[in-house]
Image (cartoon, grey):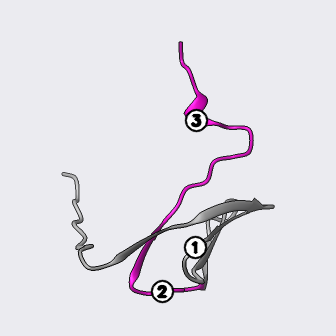
Amino acid sequence: MPITFKFKSEGYERHSCRSRREGAWLIFECPECSYVRKWNLESNKMKLENEGNRYALHNGSFEPVGLQSDKYNPN
């Protein structure tokens, strides 16, 4: 049986993070506040360097250099 989580997000700001890779680390930084999160791909450990605006919901994704999903054509 699947477990479903419902999160209340009304009333929170939404910030989209920029990402980059430095060695084994993916680094997500928010251009709107000082939020910084690091994720080590080798150890799978995550570090919150700076919580930034604690009342904002942060999201982001990482796209490796050379991978342009918007130009992908499976045909």
Q: Are marks 3 and 1 in contact (CB under 8 Å)?
A: no
Quadrant housing residue 40: bottom right
What residue range appears in magenta?
50-75
Q: Residue, x 23% and y 73% (percent of image)? A: 8
Q: Determine crowd level at label 2: few under 14, some 14-19, many 20+ residues with C-alpha closer than 10 A.
A: some
Q: Secondary structure at mark 1?
A: loop
Q: Residue, x 56% and y 21% (percent of image)? A: 73
Q: Is residue 54 above or below residue 36?
A: below
Q: Is residue 45 above or below residue 75?
A: below
Residue 66 image point, x, y percent: 74, 38
Sooner in the amino-acid sequence: mark 2 or mark 3: 2
**From this viewpoint, which residue is outermost toward the right?**
23
Q: Is residue 74 magenta?
A: yes
Q: Determine crowd level at label 3: few under 14, some 14-19, many 20+ residues with C-alpha closer than 10 A.
A: few
- Magenta-colored segment: predominant secondary structure: loop
Amino acid under label 1? Cys
Residue at the disc numbered 2:
53
Quadrant housing residue 35: bottom right
Q: Secondary structure at mark 3?
A: helix
Q: Are marks 2 and 1 in contact (CB under 8 Å)?
A: yes
Q: Residue, x 25% and y 70% (percent of image)? A: 7
Amino acid under label 3? Ser
**From this viewpoint, which residue is outermost toward the left?**
1
**From this viewpoint, which residue is outermost toward the front?**
32
Give the Cα distance between marks 2 and 3.
30 Å
Q: Residue, x 37% and y 76% (percent of image)? A: 13
